[in-house]
Amino acid sequence: MRYRDENKVQAIRERAIEMIAKEGLENFSINRLAKAAGVSPATIYIYYKDKEDLITTISIEEGLRMVRATLNGFDPTMPFKDALWLQWKNRAVFNLENSQSAFFFDQLTNSTYREQMLEVTSEEYAKTIGKYVKGAMDNGVIEEMALVTYWSLAFAPLYSLINFHKEGRDLNGKKFELTPAILEQAFNCVIKGLLK
């Protein structure tokens, strides 16, 4: 039995994320990945059963990495505004510092890989965020609403700004960069809309 070479596994993961982010799922192949990662296709099959197993495994690992990064320092008993601001900052940092992961997740949209990733990541995320949102509703801090409604109101503006940043352009086609001042301004508007 061969030992697990973490350097090779990391190279495979990084190249797979990069290739899928840039070229999409339909253009992804084990042979092209092996060449990009500097390993043989047989090496990839030591670590992954097949292409689907590789993409599913990496999707789940990246999804969990994202969830854990967004929950870094988060406590569901924190004051609502402070906890939401922490989430905004964590999400912005993760997306801006991990652009390949963000583009990788974009490519997973409407795929079975995304569904499998969400089955795992949603459970971890919902345990923490669900408690936080329910506490805010129970304590009269925010209106009663479905978790999906809360998420849409709380985070859609953030992700819209992140997308403009990734594109490097605003609505008028002018250069755009998400700055701390813009982030805070948008957050303040969102928190005013959410609080009772």
Image: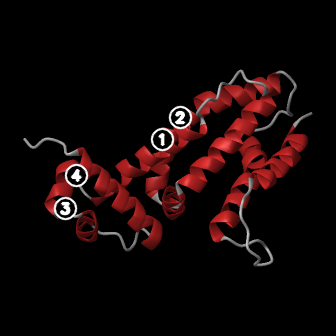
Badge 1: few (under 14), some or many (20 or more) residues near its Cα, within 10 Å? some
What is the CA distance from the residue labelled 2 to the residue labelled 1? 10 Å
Q: Residue furthest left?
A: 1
Q: From the image, state whether disc 2 or disc 3 is nearer to you.
A: 3
What is the CA distance from the residue labelled 2 to the residue labelled 4? 25 Å
Q: Residue at x 30, y 56 (%)?
A: 11
What is the CA distance from the residue labelled 4 to the residue labelled 3? 16 Å
**Contact? badges 2 and 1 (CB < 8 Å):** no
What is the CA distance from the residue labelled 2 to the residue labelled 3? 35 Å
> Does residue 113 appear to the left or right of 169 in the view shown?
left
Residue 64 image label:
1
Residue that label 4 marks: 49
Q: Quadrant of residue 169?
A: bottom right
> Does residue 7 appear to the left or right of 18 in the view shown?
left
Q: Residue at x 72, y 48 (%)?
A: 155
> Does residue 45 appear to the left or right of 37 in the view shown?
left
Residue 161 in the image: state x and y as whole percent: 73, 59
Residue that label 3 marks: 39
Q: Residue at x 75, y 51 (%)?
A: 180
SS assignment at label 3: loop
Colour convention of the picture: secondary structure
Residue 95 in the image: state x and y as whole percent: 59, 53
Q: Nearer the viewer, residue 196 or 2?
A: 2
Q: Which residue type carries mark 3?
A: Val
SS assignment at label 2: helix
Residue that label 2 marks: 123
> Is residue 48 visible to us here?
no
Q: Which residue type carries mark 4?
A: Lys
Residue 140 image label:
none
Q: Which residue type carries mark 2?
A: Glu
Q: Which residue type carries mark 1?
A: Leu
